[in-house]
């Protein structure tokens, strides 16, 4: 995560909320990346499908629920709920 903050030009002048939003974006990006890898693994190693389905379920919760609610909380000034 720290490299995500350093790599983002907006982080140089961002306040704490801005840095948190950059972190949330990084979590979302990584979540989608992992979900793509899960699909690839299921195609190449179908015997892993049951375990990968559980993994995908967890990551879907993160990108579909946790990320949007964190983003909303941060933008609404409620950082403690992010």
Image (spheres, rainbow, N blue to C red):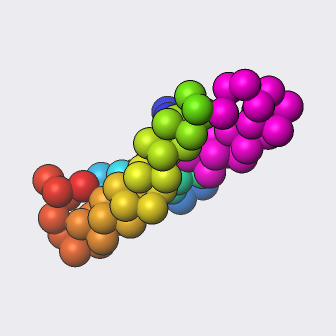
Residue at 41% from the left image edge and 52% from the top image edge: 61
Q: Quadrant of residue 72?
A: bottom left
In x, y percent, where is residue 53? Answer: 57, 39
Residue at 85% from the left image edge and 31% from the top image edge: 44
Quadrant where the C terminus sits is bottom left
Up-down: is 21 above or below 50? Answer: below
Say left or right for 60 vs 15.
right
Up-down: is 9 above or below 31? Answer: below
Magenta stretch secondary structure, dominant: helix
Range covered by the magenta-colored residues: 30-49
Say left or right for 53 vs 39.
left
Say left or right for 68 vs 30.
left
Q: Which sits in the foreground, 78 or 13?
A: 78
Up-down: is 55 above or below 80? Answer: above
Decide if residue 3 is in sight here: no
In x, y percent, where is residue 75? Answer: 29, 72
């Amino acid at each position: 995560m720290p490299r995500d903050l350093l790599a983002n030009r907006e982080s140089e002048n961002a306040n704490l909320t801005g840095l948190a939003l950059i972190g949330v974006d990084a979590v979302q990006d990584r979540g989608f990346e992992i979900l793509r890898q899960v699909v690839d693994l299921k195609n190449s190693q179908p015997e892993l499908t049951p375990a990968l389905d559980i993994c995908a379920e967890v990551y879907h919760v993160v990108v579909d629920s946790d990320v949007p609610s964190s983003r909303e909380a941060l933008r609404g000034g409620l950082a403690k709920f992010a």
